[in-house]
Image (tube, rainbow, N blue to C red):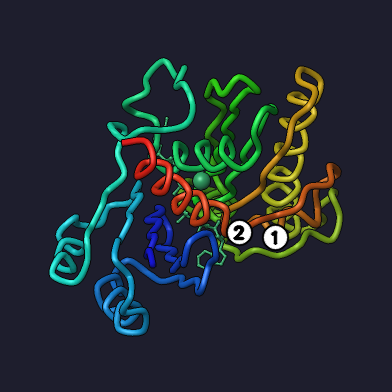
């Protein structure tokens, strides 16, 4: 049994796997990390490995305290991945993006793949049919857009996510909801159209905290899999064991 942990910039997601099957998923805040992991390990005492991919600012030590119970692994750029990394700055590529790319490569062989992760940031990652990781894009996520409109202006309120009534927002609130939500949807549909125009035979994987909200609103039909990063972490770890 393996416990995988994804430390994002907003929240921590964790999952227990038995082989390729997910047994349970957990989502929690950074300040609850040790307490939650302890509880998970009490419930799943057969966990032999804890596998962490982190782009957030949590202390390594919070995980190392569990070394008495099981083996702790932090995935890094030094690990073995199933694609050729063509990013011009491979060492600065987020480990979450590398894990998503690994999952897409292993799960969908011999095709072009675009992974869209709508989390704190929206990340786009493209792996071609010859398993070359080419890069993608990084832009502000949904909540980040609401927060930055408020934080960098004098007059804009901080709103929480709501579906806009129309694309012509007829009040400050509706204008913000339209700008944030429609802007988010148009951006993603625009990127998908661009990739579709340039590549055939490709699959799109949509994941992240806003994936379900987004999937319903896209012009392009894509199914969301909120657990894709956790599943990919499990697969990346298996791949590392098999190929090290
Ligand atoms: N309970 C929640 N707390 C924070 N963000 C949430 C919550 N539910 C949904 N979200 C949405 O999830 C997004 C963050 O996604 P997530 O995948 O958790 O980010 P990260 O992997 O960067 O930590 C935010 O843009 C927000 O709109
Ligand atoms: C782009 C990110 C901030 C996304 O983080 P997230 O939204 O998943 O919390 C993270 O992948 C990161 O810190 N990347 C480093 C820069 C790069 O990937 O090129
Ligand atoms: K992301």
**For the residue with label 2, is its CB less than 8 Å from the closest atom of ligand 1?**
yes
Do residues under tags 1 and 2 come within 8 Å of each other at their CB atoms? yes
Mark 1 is surrounded, within 10 Å at the Cα level, by few (under 14), some (14 to 19) or many (20 or more) other residues, namely some
List x then y, in percent, for residue 196. 79, 26
Residue sitting at the far front: 242
Looking at the picture, tell me which residue is in the foreground, 115 or 128.
Answer: 128
Residue 226: numbered disc: 2
Judged left or right of residue 14, residue 70 is left
Give coordinates of residue 147: x percent, y percent: 51, 54
- Quadrant including the C terminus: top left
Q: Which mark is residue 212?
A: 1
Q: Could you say which is closer to the camera, residue 17 or residue 30?
A: 17
Identified at 68% across, 53% down, the residue is: 176
Q: At x 32% / y 54%, what residue is drawn? A: 52
The Cα atoms of the two marked residues, 1 and 2, are separated by: 7 Å
Q: Can residue 153 be seen in this view?
A: no
Q: Residue at x 67, y 44 (%)?
A: 205
The secondary element bearing badge 2 is classed as loop
Residue 141 can be seen in this image: yes
Q: In this view, does 109 lie above or below 34?
A: above
Q: For the residue carrying disc 2, how many other residues have a C-alpha within 10 Å: few (<14), some (14-19), or many (20+)?
A: some
Of tags 1 and 2, the one toward the viewer is 2
């Amino acid at each position: 049994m393996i416990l995988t942990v994804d430390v994002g910039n907003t929240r921590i997601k964790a999952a227990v796997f038995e082989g390729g099957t997910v047994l349970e998923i957990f989502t929690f805040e950074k300040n609850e990390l040790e307490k939650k992991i302890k509880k998970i390990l009490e419930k799943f005492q057969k966990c032999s490995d804890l596998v962490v991919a982190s782009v957030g600012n949590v202390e390594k030590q919070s995980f190392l305290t569990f070394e008495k119970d099981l083996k702790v692994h932090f995935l890094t750029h030094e690990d073995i991945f199933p694609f050729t990394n063509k990013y011009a700055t491979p060492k600065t590529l987020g480990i979450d993006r590398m894990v998503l790319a690994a999952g897409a490569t292993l799960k969908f062989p011999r095709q072009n793949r675009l992974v869209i992760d709508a989390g704190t940031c929206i990340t786009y990652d493209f792996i071609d049919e010859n398993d070359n990781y080419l890069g993608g894009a990084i832009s502000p996520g949904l909540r980040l857009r609401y927060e930055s409109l408020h934080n960098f202006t004098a007059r804009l309120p901080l709103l929480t996510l709501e579906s806009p009534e129309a694309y012509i927002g007829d009040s400050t609130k509706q204008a913000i909801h339209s700008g944030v939500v429609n802007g988010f949807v148009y951006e993603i549909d625009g990127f998908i159209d661009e990739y579709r125009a340039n590549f055939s035979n490709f699959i799109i994987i949509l994941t992240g905290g806003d994936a379900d909200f987004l999937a319903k609103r896209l012009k392009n039909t894509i199914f969301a899999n909120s657990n894709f990063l956790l599943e990919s972490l499990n697969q990346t770890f298996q791949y590392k064991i098999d190929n090290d």
